[in-house]
Image (cartoon, rainbow, N blue to C red):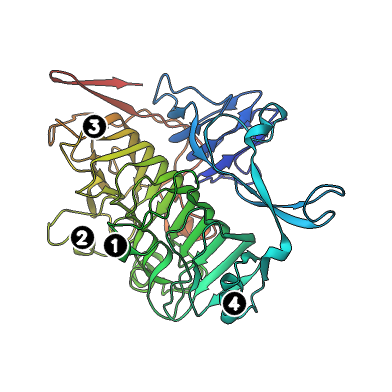
Amino acid sequence: GKLSLMDFCTNPAYASGGFMADTLVQGQIENGSQQQWISRNIEVQNGWSGAVWNQVFVGSIGGLSDASFPDPPVSTVADTPIAREKPFLVMVRQGQANNNGKMAVFVPSAVANTRGVSWKSSRRQTAQGKLLPLEDFLIATPSTLAQEYRLALGQGKHLLFTPGVYNIYDTIRVERAHTVVLGLGHATLIARNGVVPLQTLDAEGIILAGITIDAGPDAVSPVLLQIGNRSQLPSSPATSNPNHPITLSDVYIRVGGPYVGKTNIALEINAHHVLIDHTWIWRADHGIENFDKSDGYGGDNERWRSNVGVNGAIVNGNNVVAMGLFVEHFQQHNLIWNGDNGKVYMFQSELAYEPPSQMDWTQQPSGILGYEAYKVGDAVQNHYLLGGGVYCYNRNNPDIVTERGFAVPKGRSGIVLEHIMTRNLSGPGIIRSIVNGIGPQVDSNNRGPYYLDRYASIDYPTRFSNGISAPFQTGKEEIETPAVFAANQAESSGASIQKGNPRGIIWTIALASMISIVLALR
């Protein structure tokens, strides 16, 4: 039968994106209203139906083709460059080596250039890994003390967080190579008194999987999840290993929502050879913090002052690979990528909804209007992105302007962005260009999505006029009113985006001896 990626039981069927990996579907997959989605190493036997704005397939079989991008808006990579499946609990069978008849954690190895699921009989040889008996883990509960974490990690044990909410008053530091930190049932670590809840050294093979990290209300944490020590860069001790990358799998970071949260940086990566295999880093655009609803749109002024989140993710290490990088609503850049030779497959980003004024949303001292969601640092020589979307919705001040969705250094032949787009979500708000002044403006009259097929940072003009009307749209969409806002309180993001399949304008820009610009209305 069909596998639906959206909820058919509600109307409208909101769906703000997701991730699927190492999965075999014998029927058909119905994408429905999923605005963006990444599938890694999946197999679909009866096809994939539908796409909205940004669908990415990496190392997958039976998905959609990208031959006619952006109709549908699909990006594909034949083989996954590097993958490591998330550790999971197993029961060791009687007679099998290591802990017969007991529970253990299977830790898959990192593998390169794979396609399809890892556990199929014809490919089982690629499902390499090791069994770790539960005796090798500290089984943590919310009552576990800080000294128990330190003692267990000092003794070389791994960590397994059982379901629950953990108040973290002292940083949990993971220092030993190949340590596994595994959360079950969305185990949630809350930063208390401004601590960094979880920190690792730059040590090969460390795995963090299945955990949620929340900013706390007490004080501003400098970072919520820190990989490696920033003081070691740019001269890392080179303890990281491309064959044994530090891996983040299904790691979620949240600022605000259930309670007020405060941090400067949600995720900071200061190590080389890190693999991010799905993370959603979210500063709350709604929640149950009980803000004064008369103070800005639905309490947005108080939300802006109270839920402090400056940057979503800062990547300082080299050779970092991210597959499924969702970063939303931070008060400055959602993502800053300073490391060289980074690769990102599927980036999703909503800009902050609630800047009270343009001054609050202007870069200093440059005076650039707004903060790009995706910023590549000036020193970077090589960087690649496939399938990126940036969205605006300035409900608190409809006059807010963001100059660019993406920003990269100019004149670098090694920096390439493919299949990127911008979109105005629900009326108010402007993004003037897709990247570096290239691409048309999205606003309340021309909402997009607008697509750029390929951008290489060398030899591009700084700006040109587009003179293009709004793209073709299908499906009903609704401008958010206060009543709709109230109804959306339980949604993760995506204000008033309903089921549909809007298609946009592709901007194909090819470099040869001269710049050729082809506009094709799909």
Q: Secondary structure at mark 4?
A: helix
Question: Are the residues flagged by discs 1 and 4 in contact, CB closer than 8 Å?
Answer: no
Cα–Cα span, label 2 and label 4: 50 Å
349 with respect to 454 (left or right): right
* Image location of residue 356, percent across then percent down: 27, 65
The answer to which image quadrant residue 3 occupies is top right
Q: Secondary structure at mark 3?
A: strand
Amino acid at dot 1: Pro
**Residue 456 got which mark?**
3
List the residue tagged with mark 1: 355
Cα–Cα span, label 1 and label 4: 44 Å
Q: Secondary structure at mark 2?
A: loop
Viewer-proximal residue among 49 and 297: 49
List the residue tagged with mark 2: 358
Residue drawn at x 62%, y 38% as measured from the top left: 22
For marks 3 and 2 on the same chain, the one whose residue lies earlier in the sequence: 2
Residue drawn at x 32%, y 41% as measured from the top left: 341
Which quadrant of the rendered structure holds the N terminus?
top right
For marks 1 and 4 on the same chain, the one whose residue lies earlier in the sequence: 4
List the residue tagged with mark 4: 151
Amino acid at dot 4: Leu
Cα–Cα span, label 1 and label 3: 31 Å
Q: Nearer the viewer, mark 4 or mark 3?
A: 4
Q: Is residue 229 above or below residue 450?
A: below
